[in-house]
Image (tube, grey):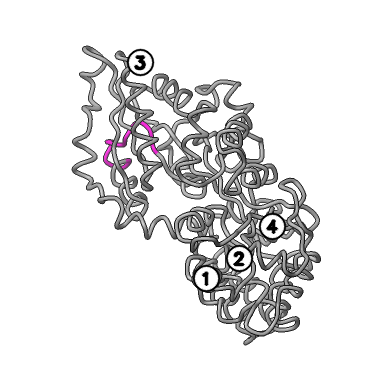
Amino acid sequence: MLRTRFRRLAAATAVAVVGLGALAACGDGGDDEATSGPVKLRFLSLAWQKESLQANKDLVAKWNAEHPDIQVEYVQGDWNSIHDQLVTSFEGGDAPDIVHYEASAIGEFSKQGYLADLSDLISDDLKGQIDQGVWDTVTFDDKVAGVPFLLESQVVIANKKLLDAAGIAVPPADGGWTWDEFQANAQKLTKPGQYGVAWALKSPTNRVLNLALNFDGKFFYTDGGRTEVRIGDAEKEVPKRIHDMIYTTKSASPEALGMSGADTLPGFFGGKYAMLPGSVSLRQQMVEQAPEGFEWVTLPPVKGLSTKQAANPQTLSIAEDSKHKKQAAEFLEYFLNPTNMAALAKGDWLVPTGKQANEELVKLTGGKQGWDVAADSAADLTVAPFQMADGYPEWKTKYATPALQQYFANKITLDQLATQLVDGGKQVLR
């Protein structure tokens, strides 16, 4: 979630915005394709990082060289403008054949009939490579609206020298700390001028609801076709633990509350914060920005009752209006084979959804730079109730984010937080 906001901001400068007219001009997309020449497909990609862009373009070029009868036109999109762009192109009947987006955003397009059901278009092999919990994030009204291919998990980045100095061992990739152990180690790492943890909670809602799955916290409950927000002990667990670290044990920095993940990096590199809970993609900034000689490690996701987290994978969909759905599906199978999916994930510093792609990525990188932890963290990523709630975006913006910010600033109690979240649900889920 944090990753999405970061990449959208970065994409604004890294990638030129594709205008609607430019999109319409790419490829013919008309009936004449069916009568002469090769099949032409338009692929709208949101890749923006240098390595990711190159990987996407190289795969398209390789496909075109090997498939002269099915030619794919690469169309560059932008995370900042993609939603409005797709609304206009879908309604105008000129959507690209293949669309890159994310699971949390394609549901409305699927329900409106703009995306093809991929259930019978993709192979059993591809289906079997991806866990059902991840497929659930792209399944709406029993229709598979996209192929999930890149995941973002929440891990912990730590200063290795500070861990060593405190006598704290780095856990193995498949055996992270419990929340109790994480909190206890944060206390060991806290001393004058140094906090054990910096929780970057400028936008806290997705983070809290994501990690709440560790304790089976759902927030959104549906009974008899009606959805409502409920706050019980399970939902209170994560916010309470974070709050306690800030105000009771004082092992977490209060000044980090208004920061994004990137904002905490100067303090982290300077030894002010020993650990940064955040996106697995933070590893990229470690590689690119850490001072010479700075030792950092990636710690596995923290465990409550489980290490479950919400999955919001990047996706590839096929437009319902595409005249060449079968050929588009053939391209998706090629584009997302294990080797290619591993290359795409490496370029974006994210986790591939495919089991074999994960294995190949660890071999490709030797497990260095936290890739072994990143790969293992995908196992417990699944769909969360809030991702299926139609009123979630409004509830998040108007009610949850302000309430959580107040709670983490110690301005309201945990019970008052619960009341505001429930009342907000009543407003948006009528």
Q: Which quarter of the rendered picture does the C terminus lie within?
A: bottom right
Q: In the displayed structure, would residue 388 be above or below residue 336? A: below
- Residue 267, given in percent of the width and then of the height, sits at 53, 74
Kind of element beneath mark 3: helix
Q: Name the residue under label 4.
A: 221
Q: Give the range drawn in magenta.
A: 90-99
| Labels 3 and 1 touching (C-beta < 8 A) | no
Q: Mark 3 points at which residue?
A: 66
Q: Name the residue under label 1.
A: 264
Q: Name the residue under label 2.
A: 276
* Nearer to us: label 2 or label 3: 2
Q: In the displayed structure, would residue 415 be above or below residue 50? A: below
Q: How far apart in space, not on screen, are marks 4 and 2 (Cα)?
A: 31 Å
Q: Dot 4: within a 10 Å radius of its alpha carbon, few (fewer than 14), some, or many (20 or more) residues?
A: some
Amino acid type indicated by mark 2: Leu
Nearest to N terminus: mark 1 or mark 4: 4
Residue in the image at 61% along x and 29% along y: 356
Image quarter for residue 197?
bottom right
* Nearer to us: label 1 or label 4: 1
Amino acid type indicated by mark 1: Thr
Residue in the image at 30% along x and 21% along y: 71
Nearest to N terminus: mark 1 or mark 2: 1
- Residue 413, given in percent of the width and then of the height, sits at 70, 83
Q: Dot 1: within a 10 Å radius of its alpha carbon, few (fewer than 14), some, or many (20 or more) residues?
A: many
Amino acid type indicated by mark 3: Glu
| Dominant secondary structure (helix, strand or loop) of the stretch shown in magenta | loop
Query: Residue 182 — which label?
Result: none
Kind of element beneath mark 4: strand
